[in-house]
Amino acid sequence: MFEFVTPQRMFRYRQLRSLVILVILTVAMFQDDPRPGPSGRGLVLLCGVVLAAAAWVAMTLRWGAPRWQPYTVGACMVVGIALTVAQHGGIAGCYALAAVTIATASLPFRTAAIMTGTGAVLLAGTHAILGAPLETVVIWAGAMLLVLLLGTIRRERAASAAALADEQAKAAALAERARLAREIHDVLAHSLSALSLQLETAAALLERDRAADAAVIVDRAGRLARDGLTETRRAVSALRGDPVPLPELLRELTADHEFALVGTARELSAETGLALYRTAQEALTNVRKHAPGSAVAVRLEYGAADVRLTVRNHGPAGPPTTGLSSGYGLTGLRERAELAGGSFSAGPTDDGWLVDVRMPG
């Protein structure tokens, strides 16, 4: 399994890599002629190597306030060029290359470009004054500009990746909000609309002095309220990611209808289980509204790689093609299935209506 590399860890890795390169360069400086030493030109070189190394460490670890970063980068570059003069060429120009690398990673582009251009001119001019071949002058100047170009490209890619990650996070948040809104809407649509109808009926009965009939309706409204609370808890549980006991819920839902379970039931994701349950719930509600009394057959089939739910009613009066009675209708059920990676279809048959949904699982 691949481990996700965080930006912080990548930054630490680059710091460590920079310090390792510094150690290698320092060792190489002590192997080159003339070598740093305790006297004469060697002492000058030794002081320069120490100063360059200190500036390198400071700009790599970003010591001090951010406003000091250009100064540490500039110090490393200047000392590198000075060492190039004292060493009559050699590899001291690598300090300037390191400074450009850090500049492109941590400084504004304009500042990094000015420092790189100035450093390239000074380094190339130094080698030219020291009598280096033209190709050496071109190589050092080109290397400085190439480092700037590569660093700028890397920065742009990092900025694009960060922007993409931010957009993906916003899209995920919006999708989650939509999912929460859909679940809350469906629960309230089933519970509160039915509860409101029952209470209105009870109020009408009380106006006609039919208290006994009104009491029956109020009792029924109480059951609807309790069922609504149960549905709410179930939706919250599914939103938390808890598995949905789909076969058991469908058996309860289809107590007055035909229910068939095909295949071996297995645990499904909360999103898949809830989508299938809501589909059955919406379809049965639709049948009760548009084709009351018609025979209904609900079939839940566990396949090798998917789960299929069909709700079929038989009767002369099928549901209209304008949609289901609550929630988001046909469009809402289709969106719910597709968001979970499945497919949804609904339409009239020869003697009724068929709702068919397939979900991965």
Image (spheres, rainbow, N blue to C red):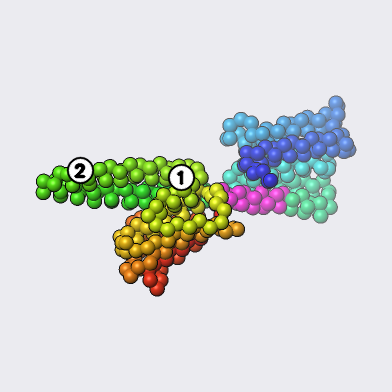
Left or right of 74, for residue 131: right
Q: Residue at left 68%, top 46%?
A: 2
- The quadrant the C terminus occupies is bottom right
Q: Quadrant of residue 351?
A: bottom left
Residue closer to the observer: 35 or 206 = 206
Q: Residue at left 76%, top 30%?
A: 50
Q: How many marks?
A: 2
Provide the residue span drawn in magenta. Answer: 144-164
Mark number, residue 239: 1
Q: Residues within 10 Å of mark 2 (few under 14, many from 20)?
A: some
Residue 330, magenta (yes or no): no
* Nearer to us: label 2 or label 1: 2
Q: Dominant secondary structure of the magenta stretch?
A: helix
Residue closer to the observer: 207 or 122 = 207
**Residue 358: horizontal and vertical position, in percent?**
51, 60
Q: Residue at left 53%, top 58%?
A: 262
- Looking at the picture, which amino acid does disc 2 mark? Ala
Say which element carries label 2.
Answer: helix
In the image, residue 221 sits, relative to residue 37, either above or below, namely: below
Residue 69 in sight from this viewpoint: yes
